[in-house]
Amino acid sequence: MTEHPRITLSPDVLAGKPVVRGTRLSVEFVIGLMADGWNEGDILANYPGLSHEDLIACLAYARDILGAEKVYPSAA
């Protein structure tokens, strides 16, 4: 998997979930905001600790995790 310097994982922060470096905001939370229809301006206005680059890093991290996922078709 590609390295993501803006995303950190620590067992002491949010039980080890991936978070945006320097925050307690998880990648899952940020992606969830986007899924709920928040645009970049809304997110940055409400979470001033985040930057455009952080949002891109969250998307890239999610892409890489999903790209590494193995899917096995079930027998019907």
Image (spheres, grey):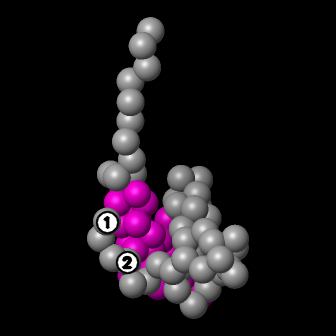
Residue in the image at 55% along x and 71% along y: 18
Residue in the image at 35% along x and 60% along y: 64
> Which residue has dot 1 on it?
1
Q: Residues within 10 Å of mark 1 (few under 14, many from 20)?
A: few
Residue in the image at 33% along x and 76% along y: 3
Q: Disc 1 marks which amino acid?
A: Met
Mainly helix, strand or loop, the magenta region?
helix
Q: Is residue 26 visible?
A: no
The percent position of residue 24, horizontal first and vertical second, equals: 66, 81
Q: Quadrant of residue 55?
A: bottom left
The percent position of residue 32, horizontal first and vertical second, equals: 58, 57
Q: Is residue 23 above or below residue 56?
A: below
The residue at the far left in this view is 2
From the viewer's perspective, tell me whether residue 11 is left or right of residue 71: right
Q: Is residue 71 visible?
A: yes
Please identify, in this view, whether the residue under mark 2 or under mark 1 is nearer the observer: 1
The percent position of residue 22, horizontal first and vertical second, equals: 57, 90
Q: Quadrant of the N terminus?
A: bottom left
From the viewer's perspective, tell me whether residue 43 is left or right of residue 24: left
Q: CA distance from mark 2 to mark 1?
A: 9 Å
- SS at circle 2: loop
Residue in the image at 43% along x and 83% along y: 6
**Which residues are drawn in magenta?**
37-65
Residue 23 lies within the magenta run:
no
Q: Quadrant of the C terminus?
A: top left
Q: Disc 2 marks which amino acid?
A: His
Q: Is residue 48 above or below residue 37?
A: below
- SS at circle 1: loop
> Which residue has dot 2 on it?
4
Viewer-proximal residue, 38 or 20? 20
The percent position of residue 13, horizontal first and vertical second, equals: 68, 79
Residue 62 lies within the magenta run:
yes
